[in-house]
Image: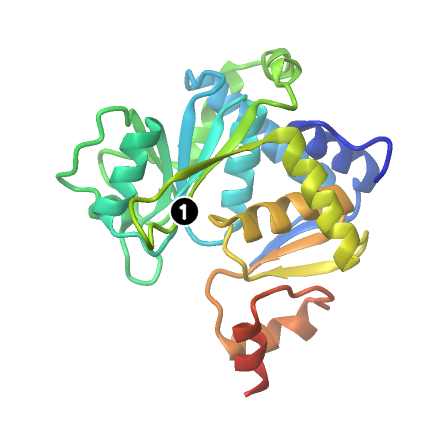
Amino acid sequence: MSDDLPETIPAAVARAAERFGAAEAMVDGDERWTFAELAERVDEAARAFVASGVQPGERISIWAPNVAEWAVAELGLHTAGAVLVPLSTRLKGREAADIMRRARVTRLFTVTDFLDTDYVALLDGLELPDLAETVILRGTVPERAVAWTDFLARAGVATPEDVADRVAAIDPDDVSDILFTSGTTGAPKGAMLRHGAGIRAFTAWSDVIGLTEGDRYLIVNPFFHSFGLKAGILACLLKGATMVPHAVFDVPSVMARIPEERISVLPGPPAIYQTMLN
């Protein structure tokens, strides 16, 4: 492993901007951002989190498919010192609410139009005593929620120094994420992941599979899972690979995007490759 390995996720964002700045970092529809531009968007999101009153260690959920806003929200909340509690897009309302209650989630970032599902509506009538705000990354914004663009507009209230202070206070042993198990054999259990350990583990993973600068990575592995979150977003930041998030796996769209985006990396379980071969 490199001696200049970052110790926290915000440090990984800053290092990627410095080392790979002009290279393409994110491709999502018409959006194409360099690593420097991604870092600017993450900083804006972090300032919006700080301006919104988010405190270090606060738990925040993202309940959405693989889209660019997911990565910006995740990296922004980490930069503000908060902890991510990702929610599977396959969860029912009661299942998501149970995790949010147990993790004491204070803010939810979600969508209202993914595969004909309104995730805000799924929570109607469910008790969420700690939830202070819901932000809509994409889709129609209900009256009781806030649009992602309006959330980002708060960034001007906080200063770069405010964010720098938050980043400086993050320790490599601080919890970065709480990932809940699927609950197959009982109630889902939250596993706590730490900044430094995650970076070391997925630098090693990237080295083993040969992920390198200039690779173009079609991320079909969901961001709400460690496979997409760590072996996807984080690995690309560490190695300088381009993130090409893919919201729904289906063979025709994947096979079309591979030549269109010059994809060089497509990890997945055996079932994905068998489906493609078939």
Residue 154's place in the image compared with 257, above or below, is above
Question: Which residue type does callout 1 highlight?
Answer: Thr
Hey, which quadrant is residue 160 in on the image?
top right
Q: Which of the two residues, 239 or 253, is positioned nearer the viewer here?
A: 239
Tell me if I can see residue 154 in this picture: yes
Q: Which is more toward the observer, 88 or 184?
A: 184
Vertical order, 109 against 183 (above or below): above
Q: Which residue is mark 1?
A: 181
Residue lying at 50% horizontally and 44% vertically, measured from the top left: 70
Residue that sits furthest to the left in the current view: 125
Left or right, residue 256 beside residue 261: left
Please indicate whether residue 205 sits to the left or right of residue 118 in the image. Answer: right
Circle count: 1
* Pick the front one: 263 or 57: 57
Check the image and name the residue furthest to the bottom: 278
Q: Position of residue 272 (x, y in %)?
A: 54, 73
- The quadrant in which the C terminus is found is bottom right
Q: Secondary structure at mark 1?
A: loop
Q: Is residue 250 left or right of residue 170?
A: left
Q: Which residue sits at x=60%, y=34%?
A: 41
| Residue at 37% across, 51% down | 182
Q: Residues within 10 Å of mark 1 (few under 14, many from 20)?
A: some
Can residue 34 be seen here? no
Q: Residue at x 65, y 15 (%)?
A: 164
* Residue 35 quadrant: top right
On the image, the x and y values in percent for residue 208 come to 77, 55
Residue 8 position in % (x across, y down): 67, 28
- Residue 159 placement (x, y as % from top left): 59, 14
The answer to which quarter of the image holds residue 96 is top left
